[in-house]
Amino acid sequence: MKVLIASDHGGVNIRKEIMSLMEEMKIMYEDLGCECSNSVDYPDYAIPVAEKVANGEADFGILICGTGIGMSIAANKVKGIRCALVHDVFSAIATREHNDSNILAMGERVIGPGLAREIAKVWLTTQFLGNRHEKRIQKITQYEEEYCYQNWN
Ligand code: RB5
């Protein structure tokens, strides 16, 4: 399993926390920034992570900004991405089991590093349940196939 992680300047501390978690869990990851000595723009980080997850270069992505909202909005523009903005452990489990989310977004101005770590831990280890949830995902995928243009190939 390979995970891509990125943040804007508003999510650096949680990004570091989650990278240390992934080292402990022996999960292979790649850090796509930001360097963040200055203010940066979250779409410049969300879109490359989302494109790489969508085209199979990585299995999952984790994106952190101040609220998680900008990152999730931007990532969900990419065809094939199901980015879940999560700030509690219950939703972290549910979004893997039910939505097969492939990117996790969190907001560092909303939750602290301890909760972010717990959320990431369960999100990274919970499996999609399939069955009745599969056909719901397929309806989203079918809509994307019919109506959403993707130009990263
Ligand atoms: C940056 O100030 C902030 O807008 C960003 O981190 C994020 O919260 C956007 O959704």
Image (cartoon, helix red, strand yellow):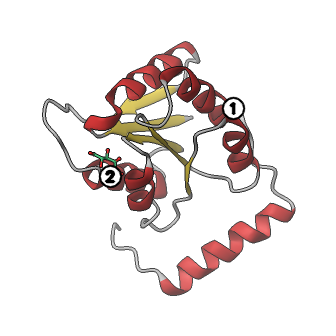
Which residue sits furthest top?
24
User: To which residue does mark 2 refer?
Assistant: 48
Q: Nearer the viewer, residue 17 or 110?
A: 110
- Indicate if the residue with disc 2 has its beta carbon within 8 Å of ligand 1: no
Residue found at x 66% / y 41%: 92
- Residue 36 image position (x, y, % from top left): 19, 33
Quadrant into which the N terminus falls: top right
Q: Is residue 33 left or right of residue 49?
A: left
Q: Are marks 2 and 1 in contact (CB under 8 Å)?
A: no
User: To which residue does mark 1 refer?
Assistant: 125
Residue found at x 58% / y 31%: 120
Amino acid bearing label 1 = Thr
- Residue 8 image position (x, y, % from top left): 28, 40
Q: Is residue 130 left or right of residue 20?
A: right
Task: Identify the element where label 2 is drawn.
Answer: helix
Residue 33 showing in the rendered view = no
Residue 92 showing in the rendered view = yes
Cα–Cα span, label 2 and label 1: 24 Å
Nearest to N terminus: mark 2 or mark 1: 2
Local packing at callout 1 (Cα closer than 10 Å; few below 14, some 14-19, many 20+) is few
Q: Locate residue 109: give its quadrant.
A: top left
Residue found at x 35% / y 34%: 11
